[in-house]
Image (cartoon, grey):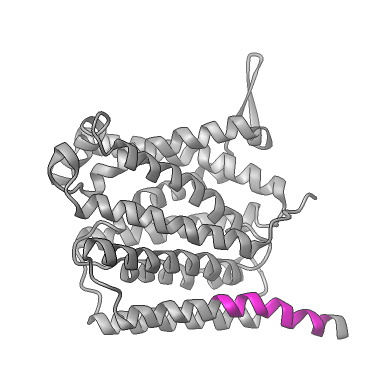
Amino acid sequence: MTKRRIPLLAVTLVYLVMWVPYISLTRYLAIASQGSIGRPLGGLEILPVSLTVSLVVTYLFFAASGWWRAAHQVKIGRLSLPRPTRWTLLAGAGAALLMIAVPLSYTFAGVSIPFVQLLMRGDVLLIAPVIDLMTRRKVRWFSWIALALVAVGLIVTIRQRGGLSLPPLCIAVIGLYILGYFIRLGIMSRIAKSGDLQALKQYYVEEQLVAAPIAVVALGVIAVFAAGKQAMQLQFGFTGLWHNGVTGLIAVIGALVFIQGLLATTILLDERENTYCVPLERSASVLGGTFAAYLLASFFHMPFPTSAELFGAILLIVAVAILSLGPLLTRPRKAAS
């Protein structure tokens, strides 16, 4: 099998850096008056353009890189086209939930970026060892320690904030996010979690063939058939932003969605247990969000992260250090035995 040559921690570092412009731009669009619109954009207004751009960039990448050939194929006349299996189709539906939930989570007034990130990432951490046990993967000692540290950071932040008082739509978004990750992690562990480059290509192509289309179609159905404020925001996102000055910024967000998705999948499909990979990926996104929060506080007078949120971020850094050093400390024991 062909193994990836890029170190996992290097991939994780690039992934962390990508979160800073993504979160900063998304939050900026939601808090600052935008051009001829004369007001900030709602989270649902941003989604149609950003997800459509992400879909186009993803398909262009498949065509230019040749990755589409790694997927299962279907013959239509002389054409051979990639297709998902039933498992990657389901994983694509889970990924679509994430594509909708993540950008929405950064647009709620009164809910800080580090807090909502800790909630969403922390809850996913709880399901990582469950899936490892279900798929009979051994969870090593340093993975348990890192998991515990991140859980402590989550608890401290929630207590300092005074509980989980959140807007109903924010709670729904977090629920969709957790469901999407549970679906994806379970299927990844079942069919593709080997660290093999061909397995990564096959899984990613088949999942993303359907993820963005499902997300865009689902939002379109809501915009056409639903009623209320949320449906009106989606309608404006589909029809009122394509010839507006903010389209370029939203397009950048869509391109960053593609990059993040590829990097996150690379981390999560590493052959090591989910209780190792998930804290690594979760920590990178939370730390990226913390850096973005400082940028927004410095330039747009948003609140700085609280002491509890900083404490949680420090625990995440310690968790990443343990995940980095744990395998190095374990190897000599294996050699000696």
The quarter holding residue 10 reads bottom right
Nearest the eye: 116 or 202: 116
In the rendered image, residue 219, in percent from the top left (x then y), is placed at 30, 39
- Image point (81%, 83%), residue name: 332
The stretch of residues the image draws in magenta is 320-334
Q: Is residue 54 above or below residue 74?
A: below
Above or below 10: residue 87: above
Work out whether residue 78 can be spotted.
Answer: yes
Say whether residue 89 is left or right of residue 8. left
Residue at 73% of width from left, 78% of height from top? Answer: 328
> How far across and down, in percent of the image, does residue 253 sit?
38, 45
Q: Is residue 266 magenta?
A: no
Q: Is residue 286 left or right of residue 142?
A: left
The single residue placed furthest to the right in the displayed view is: 336
Q: Is residue 337 visible?
A: no
Q: Which quarter of the image is occupied by the C terminus?
A: bottom right
